[in-house]
Image (cartoon, grey):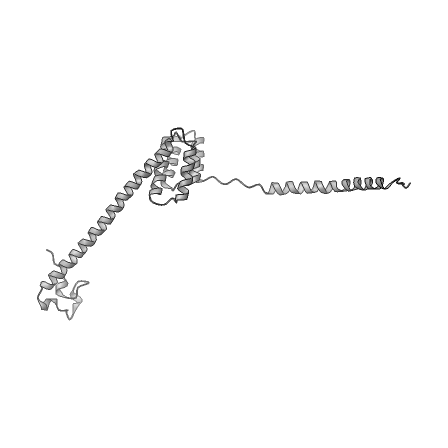
Amino acid sequence: MSRHFNSDDEIDELSLDYSQTSSAPNSYASSQTSLGSRSLAVREPKPLSVLGQLLNAYRAAKRNKGVMRQSVIDHIHSNAVSLADVQLLTPDYKHDYGFINKLSSTIAYHCAAGRISDADKETIFTHIFTHDDERSDVYNRVHARIEHFQKNMKHLHTAQRNRTLREKQERQQEEQSLATRIQEFPAHLRAPVPNPEFLPIGATTVADIPTTP
């Protein structure tokens, strides 16, 4: 039996109900697709660094804990420090002076040697300062070690420069002394030898042969 509509309003109402009902499955599918895309966008956690693995092993160790602790200290000593390493050690280990002293020395050494850029140094110091205790103990230790290493580096560079200058002066004196001795030899000894095969390497005349003083 066909339905008769009394007015245009009934026709519009029925059309609206149909459009909402027909769009519902599409909305559900769209939401499922959106959820699926979100689940695919989840990123895998970053793998732990070597220091992170050593710290986990140290915390979990029930036997040989001292050995694991020394492994952490050796790693800090032997490798340049990054911000990620500093974040692993502070604030969790800010009262472990074995770790913190080694961390301070390593940061200071590489800063003094110019292996840590000013930008990286700023981010490292900012993290240490904002995660330190009320006395800024770690921050002060790092700065004290940096001053110590910078002073040592300055003395080392000065000593190397003085040694290079001294060695250069000694070579010049030896060359001048040798040239003076050669001039003191008779002319026939300073003349080139016709068959210099028997002369030492680098000598072209008898006067060039080094003599023991």
Residue closer to the observer: 150 or 70: 150
- Which residue is painted at 30% across and 41% down in the image? 150
- Which residue is painted at 64% across and 42% down in the image? 36
Quadrant in the rendering for residue 70: top left
Q: Taking 199 as reference, is 139 left or right?
A: right
- Which residue is painted at 37% across and 34% down in the image? 139
Residue 145 seen from this side = yes
> Most extreme residue toward the bottom, as rendered?
194
Residue 101 seen from this side = no
The location of residue 137, given as percent across then percent down, is: 37, 31
Residue closer to the observer: 11 or 138: 11
Q: Quadrant of the C terminus?
A: bottom left
Q: Is residue 168 above or below residue 58?
A: below
The location of residue 93, given as percent across then percent down, is: 41, 31
Quadrant in the rendering for residue 122: top left
Q: Is residue 25 above or below residue 182?
A: above
- Which residue is painted at 30% across and 38% down in the image? 148
Residue closer to the observer: 40 or 23: 23
